[in-house]
Amino acid sequence: MTTPPHARLPHRADGLALAALLFAALCTLSAYGATSLVAAALGDLGVMNVGWKAMLWLSIAATACLFLPAVRALTAVRRASTALATGDLVSARIETAAAREHGWLTFGWGAFALIILGFASFVVMNDVAVGHTFFFLPLIQDKWWQVTRQFLINNIFIFVVAEILVLAWGLVVALARLMPGRAGQPIRALAILYCDIFRGLPAIVTLYLIGFGIPTSGLPDLIVPHIVGLFTDLSAMTVAEQRAATRIPVMWWCILALTLTYGAYVAEVYRAGIDSIHWSQIAAARSLGLSYMQTMRYVVVPQAVRRILAPLLNDFIGLQKDTALVQVVGVIDAFNQSRIIASNAFNLSAVTIVAILFVIITIPQARFVDRLIDRDNARMRAGG
């Protein structure tokens, strides 16, 4: 019996289901080959044991699970054909959609498995030379605390202090750039000039100029002693003690440089958020007698901050990563410490520790901001 033309589905999923099944077979064969390569490398190193064998077989079994959605796709295709033959178009369309979903599910997780397997194969290539270079476990176990300690003392400290200053300074610059009226034109010009300059300068150049230039210029020696002298009697100290008491650590110059650099970026983010608030809210606030600054504080800025959480996170992740640049002015941060270890051991595994540390503190921040955004969106949809 021939199916009427109006009863035929425009797109069938037979080819996709068959391709998904073949792709699942390809991924399983790739898993077997990759695990065989890893097993041979572990055997050459003499570290192969029951635990590693179980993990390798578990990897193959996990990859073979791709057959489940592929087989479900084929089953859904058959059900769709049966429904179509009986004239049940609704069931046929439902089963076809299910077949497509299971087929693409196979391709998605298959691509994920191939990437993981490819990375494992990359690590053990060239007689595990790649793994020795980047993931030499004895060196990582021996030096991880030495690198982590500098990360906590310097990188995290610089990042947290600079982030607080950037939040405040960026808002000040954004408000200055949005200053209304002819009287605010010079302030707006200065804010625009600042943003243009420090967004154009690479962070490493700013760090170098401020970290080396200001202390070398002698400017702190003219200002700091007078400030410290208000709280401490410098006349009772020797010259060496006076210099030690009035010396500003290089770390604070790094914080200043990063604050100036990222303050320009964050100011633009603030400005975009403020500009996104409808002008009628500003007009309503001003008509109620609120000043410009009161309108910004109580009406505009709280709403703008909600909208710019994601862009702010991007800037803070960039700030967090750029703390590794402070090594150019001699600060012994985690990256500088890892470079010293790498040059002594002729191995880059210590630098891998730094990479892992940065990723570990970045991912929770991203997930936290995602949760804040979802909660705020849910509240907005509920009318809160």
Image (cartoon, rainbow, N blue to C red):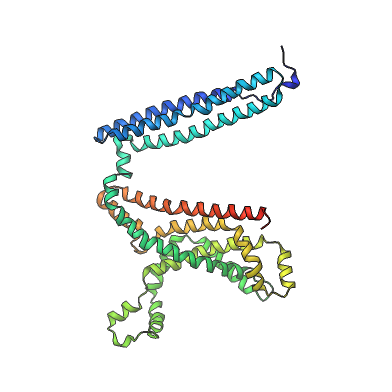
Q: Quadrant of the N terminus?
A: top right
The picture places residue 212, in percent across and down from the top left corner, at 38, 68
Residue 53: name its quadrant.
top left
Residue 157: name its quadrant.
bottom left
Residue at figure coordinates x 72%, y 75% from the top left: 289
Residue 271: name its quadrant.
bottom right
244 is higher (above) or lower (below) than 319: below
Q: Quadrant of the C terminus?
A: bottom right
Residue at figure coordinates x 44%, y 36% from the top left: 115
- Total labels drawn: 0
232 is higher (above) or lower (below) than 272: below
The picture places residue 33, in percent across and down from the top left corner, at 37, 27
**Residue 81 as seen in the image, left or right of residue 344:** right
The picture places residue 332, in percent across and down from the top left corner, at 33, 61
Of residues 228 and 376, which is closer to you in this image? 376
Residue at figure coordinates x 68%, y 71% from the top left: 180
| Residue positioned most to the top | 1
| Residue positioned most to the left | 46
Of residues 216 and 268, which is closer to you in this image? 268
